[in-house]
Amino acid sequence: MILLPILTFGPMLAAMLIACIGRRTALLRDMLTALTGAAAFVLCLLLCYLGDISFALPGFCGLGLTLRADGFRSLYGCIAAFMWMMTGLFSPEYMSHGHHRTRYAFFTLLTLGATLGVFFSDDLFTTFIFFEVMSFTSYAWVAHEETPGALKAANTYLSVAIIGGLTTLMGLFLLYHQQGSLAFDALKSSNSFAGTIAAWLVVVGFAAKADLYPLHIWLPQAHPVAPAPASALLSGILTKSGIFGLIVVCSRIMAGNAAFGNALMALACVTMVLGAVLALFSTDLKRTLACSSMSQIGFICTGLASMTLLGEHGSLAAYGTVMHMANHSLIKLTLFMAAGVIYMNTHALDLDDIRGFGRRKPLLHIAFLLGTLSIACIPPIGSGYASKSLLHEALLEVISHQEALGQPVLAYRAAEVLFLVSGGLTVAYMLKLYVCIFWEKHPTRQSEFDAQKSCMRPVTAIALLGSAALLPFLGALPQTLLSPLGARSAAFFGQHAVAEAIPYFSAANLQGAGISIAIGLGVYLFIVRPLLMSRQVIGGAREYINLWPDALDLENRLYRPMLLTVLPQVLTFVCRLLMELPEAIVMGLRRTVFRQHRTHRAVPVGNRFTYALGCMFNAAARLLNTTLLHRSPMRTDFEYLLAASWRELREGTRNFTVSISFGLLLLCVGLYLTCLYLLQ
Amino acid sequence: MLIFLTLLLPLLGGAMLSVLRFSRARARAVYVEGVVLLTSVLVWAVLLSRTNADVILCRLTDDLPITFRVDGMGCVFAGLVSLLWPIATLYGFEYMKHEERENTFFTWYTMSYAAALAIAFAGNLFTLYVFYECLTLITLPLVIHKKDTLSIRAGRRYLTYSISGAAMAFIALVCIIWFGSTTDFRLGGVLDAAKIAGHEDLLLLVFLLAFVGFGAKAAVFPMHAWLPAASVAPTPVTALLHAVAVVNAGAFAVLRVIYYSFGRSFLYGTWAQTAALLLACLTILLGSAMAVREQHFKRRLAWSTISNLSYMLMGAALMTEGGMVGSLTHMVIHGVIKITLFFCAGAVLVRTGKEYVQDLRGFGRLMPFTSGVFLLGSISLVGTPPLAGFVSKWNLLTAAADTGLGLGVVAVVALIISAVLTAVYLFTVAAPMFFRPLNTDLSHLDGFNRDPGWMMKLPLLLLCAAMIALGLWSQPLVTFLRQVAAGLTF
């Protein structure tokens, strides 16, 4: 079917076109960018309508390219294209004072093609190809500002992407070796040791992109420095492409593998809590949102882990996962665009600088509030509520499942507690942002902020509100809007669709949400306000402070020193050693076997042997002269004596050796030896 | 007879150049390009006519003839060389304008084409050995072209390593004459089972000598030190000879020795294979690690070449059909990519005189075309799909995992680590080209386009197209190489 290659390669062609025309006509370029996103969205919707479609290009890159759009894939294609369309509308104003706008547009469209390629892929090889292309093209987003911070973040991003990508390649390659095919449908679950190793290697690259602990280091740096629309895409979609890979591993290769599920659950919990805590401590708007993304990825991964642990009965977990993915994409789109609006007006992201900016700006206020309610999972209009309830439900299912199996469940109970606490922290950090931006007043610039009535152009407002407007509907009508997403996707997750209606607003679910909200309010009132804001009142307001200790920075404390200092030092030492070896051999040979010049000086008389012997005799004689032969000293010119006798001997023997009798003598010796040999 | 003509044409054409002594650059360019192009056309005529017969030039003794034959592997090498030579020559015209003694340069440059082709078409080990030595001697004047202390020292080093390598290879030649039924190349080896009984260990030792000896040109550890030093030569030499022709001749000779003289079944699973594989893996890591440390642009690429040549030797040392396929694939694809990267380095050198990595920041604005090509080449060499470098790496990895030896894992790990290092040493050049401002000493040039002229751009463009095409549609090439490895091609 021709639609699929159009969707993946079309945007790349559009990118080329933009690279050609971009510098001349900015307007056309911006329109083309947004139009490509819109066209992709329309085509993706068409794909959703058309149902199961596949496309294959055998021989491409060696193993062939296969694309397929079935339930989950066409759904995620839609979401991706929607996000590109919205950011495409949003970026012209945001970028209007920036530099290298053509470069930005070029790489954005390349990334669109690659991302759609990832989501439509039907074998891991195709996934990997587009995944790598996506990693490289999105580097341009992170490095876009070209400030030292941006370049450092971009380096980190690229390093993590490359190391992760190559590890994944190695895993894919082992997998191919074991299973003989990388097509999704042909992947079998494998519990062997080699199979587990392969699966973990494959997971590394995807987990790095999805931002799972301990490979999360790039995200909190990259998102704040990238342009806001790019942050929205990085956070909303690119992390999901990593999740896509994890889904494939969890649902096919490692389906029902308890050890894998447990390990993933542990990582997911760490990511979830760490992200939320980092977000709570952060005093930078975009950094908070970035850390929040990390935390939400943790939530999504608990769903995946639950699904793996539950085996064939993981339908609810799968539903929760896909719904939370979709929710998180849309929520982060809204929130990052709102952050973008704030940044393009104030050119600041620090909470102390943007405090009070949102007052008397109803559109921005509504959009941000909708995003906040959704991510904090406040029923009934917070869209995150439904998905998170399902994830919670799945976790409870895991507990009862393990109890039925007779396994200890304490760890899972702890995971549940962490889940609820993280939910609470989400409420707390979003409340911190919301209160700071929309309720508090800036000590000095408030009147200036209030004067900026029109903080965005109409097109930008449409993009922002269009994204935000979806959220309350999703939140209020989960049964009609969110459940179908799960039903569409269940097959891709290897699960059955849930037949009966899911009671989203049941008492148990509401109770879970209530606990989280209570924790969140508690944390905000008793930790954020008293502890995370300075005691001194500066200019009429208390500053937000970041108490997060630097010692916990995994990147600067561990990864960078390891990769940049320890490893090169060791390698260099070994290399130097090895390199010197052949040269040393050559030098050694020159000194010994192929001696080119004599290093010793010529002896004054005789040859070296007689001279050395003479000197020894002289030394002995001198020693004797000073001790025993004190009265009648001996001669001390033995070297001359020996030299003279040697000369005599040489002359005497020369006369002899050139004589015929010597020749005869040698002949006789030779004959004797021959006779002896023959006689034996 | 066509083969003789193919070999004679560049030899005489080059030699004539030192007689004709063109004073006008244009006339010389037309003449040299004509000779080279005609030779390439003849080569392809030879390749496509598919004559399988031996052509004997002369006989030293009855069983030591100098023979030429066109077989599958020869086709690959000759095809590669014949496509790249005209491109590199075209590039050379513009590049050499800023060097002196162009007549001398192009004399040797054209004549070495003949030596490379003779190696490709060599029908037995003796012929290969003879022309292998010839290639060393013919390319020596190119290395010391500048005639300053540095290049003369590099030339001496090149000579020392090559000749001592050839001396080791000579022992292998003698042993093959002694223990083999013939010196001809036959897929599967020519060792005579009756003669070698009891001498296996000796032969394995001799094989190892040959591996290191012929490997000297492919810069295998411990014979690698000449290659980074030789990067003082003019860029057309470093690009064509020290990234493709000469060094691949080394890898080619090793492949011949393993698969066509000793035979892989004799060597498979022996300690000699282990040693050869370990040497290759060691060189892979050594080359990549040193490339990361090296700050001189061309020398960094030279270290990278060392590492990549050992990919080929590693494939060869796997002693499987897959290994041979991987090795040949990498020979072709690495040739295309590395010559591109060197051309970019040369363009930078000619147009701005910058030769250190940190000087190249912000060149994306100064030389957009060159920087773009370099970026593409870098991505390709790292092995990112869908560009060409991925295809060969995938083939090599598959071959390494399929050997059934424990050492296969070592090879896989070495390849992956090296891939990471490759990314480091190339992207630390390529990324700052686009994401850093120009260094202050060049900022007065900001806004000007310093890209080279068409004679340097066209080769780069062609090579880029080849890189993309080989990445997207590698199937025909890989299929052909599989046939070669299986002995199915004529």
Image: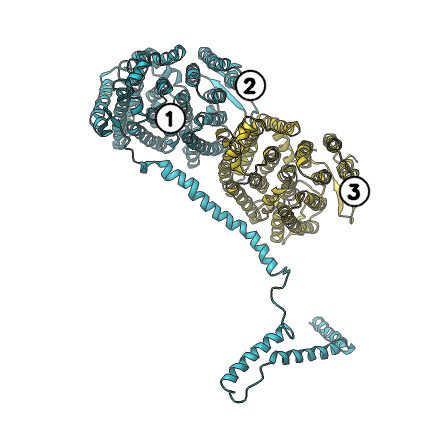
Chain colours: A cyan, B yellow
Q: What amino acid is found at the position of numbered circle 2 in the picture?
A: Cys
Q: Which residue is mark 1?
A: A224
Q: Percent x, y for residue B51?
A: 75, 33
Between A576 and A49, which is closer to the camera in this rendering? A576
With A565 as the anchor, is A353 left or right in this view? left
Mark 1 → mark 3, Cα distance in angstroms? 71 Å
With respect to residue B187, does A298 lie above or below?
A: above
- In percent of width and height, residue A99 lies at 46, 22
Q: Are marks 1 and 3 in contact (CB under 8 Å)?
A: no
Please identify, in this view, whether the residue under mark 2 or under mark 3 is nearer the observer: 2
Q: On the image, numbered disc 3 is attached to which residue? A: B57
Left or right relative to A493: residue A398:
left
Tag of residue A20:
2
Q: Earlier in the sequence, mark 2 or mark 1?
A: 2
* Relative vertical location of residue A582 with respect to residue B434 in this rendering, above or below: below
Residue under mark 3: which chain is it in?
B
Residue for point 50% across, 20% down: A102
Residue B44 location, x and y as percent?
Answer: 72, 31
Type of amino acid under label 1: Pro
